Structures are given as C-alpha cells and as structure tokens.
Amino acid sequence: MTMRPSLKQNNKYRGMKNLERLSLAGELSATMAHEIKNPMTVVHGLAQRLKHKAPKELQTDFDLMIDELDRANSILNSYLALTRERSLEKRPHNLAAIVHSLSALLAAEATARKVALVIDADPAVPWQPLNENAIKQLIVNLVLNGMDAMPTGGTLTIKVKHNGDTCDLIVADTGVGITPKVMKNIFAPFYTTKEKGTGLGLPVCKEIAEHHGATIEVVSAADAGTAFTVKFPLPNRQQSAAE
C-alpha cells in the first residue's frame, strides 16, 4: 500500500524548495551585480575622458551622466554588501579603538558639512569578537545618515560605552528627526526619503549588526534629532575562560 504524503509534509517540502529558489536567486543577483559593475566602470571612465574633449554646451550633460553612473555604482556596492555571504571572520577588537581609528576621516567629513563632531568612546570597554571592516562600514553608514539629517549643520555624537552585558555604540544627531511613518520602513531595502539615496545604508547596518548578534534601537523626535544604539552582546567571561 502506497502512503500518500500528508498536507503538512507537502507544505514543508514546498517551503524547502522556496528557500532553495530564494537562495539561488540571491546568488544569481549578486553575480549579476558584479558583472554589471565591470561595464559600468568602463563607461564611467570613457565619460570622464570624453567630457574633457566635449564642447562647453555639453559639459552639464556629461556631469549628469557621471553623477548618475556614480549613483548606480553606489547602489550596486550597497546591494553587494547586503547580499554577500556573511561568514565574516571575527577577531578580538576594542570597539572604541575602531571608532577612534575613523576619527580623522569623520572629522574631515563633518567639517565639510559644517557639523560639530563629538566622540566619546571609552577605551576601557571590554574587547569582543568583531569583524573590523564590517564595523567600520556600519559606523560610517550611521554617521553619514546622521549628517544627512542635518543639512544646515548641527552636532553629531558618537559614544561607545560598557552597559552591563553589552557594549553599546551610539550615533546621535540633532537633525530633523524621523516621522513615525518613515520609522516603520527605515530598515527596508531601497526605501529612502533622500533625493539621491540608495535606501541600502541602514539595511546594511542591520545586516552587519545581526551578523554580530547585535540589535539596533532607534529613538527619534521631530526637530530634536535621532539616536541609533547598536547593542553588541559581550561574550560570557566564564565561558571564555573555560575555552
């Protein structure tokens, strides 16, 4: 007697096949993004070369072409950062030291935007397993997001502090704030309120945080600013000692 699979078994099978299709689609889209970047790089280079030879009345057209190619490239880079396999190697690092290593770069950007930069990163925070490059990307993304919220200037504060069983990274601005409607979608890929935004900066931050077992909390008020708090769990010291 042949046993027919139950409805539950069929649903489980279909669910597994759907996951396989999604995984394959993710791999194919990441490969396509890589392949698209190559001809775009060539076109970008040619556009810059031809701009120097073009008559004056065409300069604005070439500037627009180059700007749009830069924007498309930025979208692809952010997408690849979001979709690439997150088997990132983690080593013991001091989160405050990573912040301080970016201070010169962030200060230059702040000066260009007329933003006061305040860094309060306690070097005494416990070391923890981190992927340094990914954490740098997360910090820069959050900082640029905060500066974008202050188009006429303001203060951006970066803090790192030990908070019980977590090490917290706080990036706070004094900008326009986030409306409740926008707040619901800030981590959704490609969602943006910026004219030339990619909508991938914050989703990448969320992906990096999750890879480290961290969570992101957001507090915002209209015309009072926004604070992003990334809470990194600290390893159990007794477990670490036993290992």
Image (tube, rainbow, N blue to C red):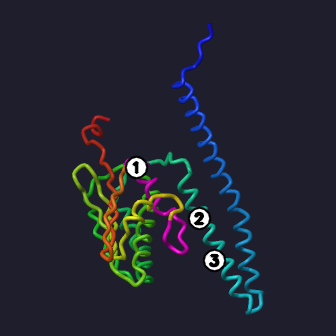
Disc 3 or disc 1, which is closer to the eye? 3
Disc 3 residue crowd, few under 14, some 14–19, many 20+, Cα 10 Å? some
Label 3 or label 1, whichever comes before in sequence order: 3
Read off the magenta span. Answer: 192-213
Indicate the position of residue 131 as horizontal and vertical percent values.
44, 53
Compute the Cα span from label 2 to label 3: 12 Å
- Work out whether residue 112 or residue 101 is closer to the camera in this orientation and state it: 112
Q: Residue at x 37, y 54 (%)?
A: 93
The residue at which mark 3 appears reads as 67
* Amino acid type shown at disc 2: Ile
Judge from the rendering whether residue 78 lies leftward or rightward of residue 61; answer left or right.
Answer: left
* Amino acid type shown at disc 1: His
Judge from the rendering whether residue 91 lies leftward or rightward of residue 160; answer left or right.
Answer: right
- Residue 167's disc is none
Indicate the position of residue 215 as horizontal and vertical percent values.
35, 52
Determine the secondary structure under disc 1: loop
The residue at which mark 2 appears reads as 75
Compute the Cα span from label 2 to label 1: 24 Å
Give above or below for 27 relative to 136.
above
> Does residue 198 show up magenta in the picture?
yes
- Work out whether residue 151 or residue 106 is closer to the camera in this orientation and state it: 151
Mark 2 vs 3: CB contact within 8 A:
no
- Work out whether residue 44 or residue 223 is closer to the camera in this orientation and state it: 223
- Residue 212's disc is 1
Q: Residue at x 41, y 79 (%)?
A: 110
Mark 2 vs 1: CB contact within 8 A:
no
Determine the secondary structure under disc 2: helix
